[in-house]
Image (tube, rainbow, N blue to C red):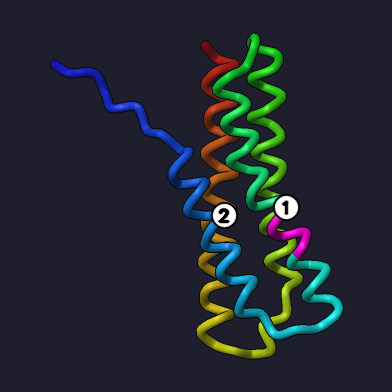
Amino acid sequence: MTSPKKFDLIPRCVTFAKATREFVKQLPQSDHNREYARQLIRSSSAIGANYIEANEALGSKDFYYRIGIARKEAKETRYWLELIDTVERTRLDATRVDLAQEAHELKLIFSSILEKRRKA
């Protein structure tokens, strides 16, 4: 029997950050959207960056810290997505909802990683 295939989250995090960047490019321009978009780009890209750092952790404490930060950034990304104003553009709003769902799923994955590592 073969061992289960290890799932690599890095490509998923990269895809998510790129999709978020493309979403931001389509947003209606307003003062508040510009500020929310800046925060959104930072937090969505920080998810993967912190996951990479966790994989290079020097010890368990560092690993937990970095995964915790990745989880926090996923939660923050979802928050900024909730604040973005799509001005009732149906397709753009559907993209916003999809991105918020992906941020939520990433948060759940990082929560699960933390829980499983602590039990081990």
Res 62 quadrant in image: top right
Gap between marks 1 and 2 measured at Cα: 9 Å
> Which amino acid does the dot numbered 1 rest on?
Arg
Q: Residues within 10 Å of mark 2 (few under 14, many from 20)?
A: many
Looking at the picture, how far across and down is residue 52, in whole percent? 57, 30
In the image, taking residue 68 as reference, residue 104 lies left or right, namely left
Q: Which residue is mark 1?
A: 42
Q: Residues within 10 Å of mark 1 (few under 14, many from 20)?
A: some
**Residue at 58 percent of width and 41 percent of height:** 48
**Residue at 69 percent of width and 49 percent of height:** 75
Looking at the picture, how far across and down is residue 98, in whole percent? 51, 67
In this rendering, the answer to whether 96 lies above or below 39 is: below
Q: Hey, which residue is sitting farthest right in the picture? A: 31
Nearest the eye: 78 or 43? 43
In the image, taking residue 10 as reference, residue 58 lies left or right, namely right
Q: Secondary structure at mark 2?
A: helix
Badge 1 vs badge 2, beta-carbon distance below 8 Å: no
In the image, taking residue 7 as reference, residue 12 lies left or right, namely right
Q: Secondary structure at mark 1?
A: helix
Magenta stretch, main secondary structure class: helix
Nearest the eye: 115 or 107? 107
Does residue 22 belong to the magenta stretch?
no
* Image quarter of the N terminus: top left
Looking at the picture, how far across and down is residue 115, in whole percent? 57, 25
**Mark positioned earlier in the residue sequence (1 or 2):** 2
> Which amino acid does the dot numbered 2 rest on?
Ala
Res 87 quadrant in image: bottom right
**Residue at 52 percent of width and 38 percent of height:** 109
Q: Which residue is mark 2?
A: 17
Nearest the eye: 68 or 8? 8
Which residues make up the magenta segment? 38-42
Looking at the picture, how far across and down is residue 45, in whole percent? 64, 49
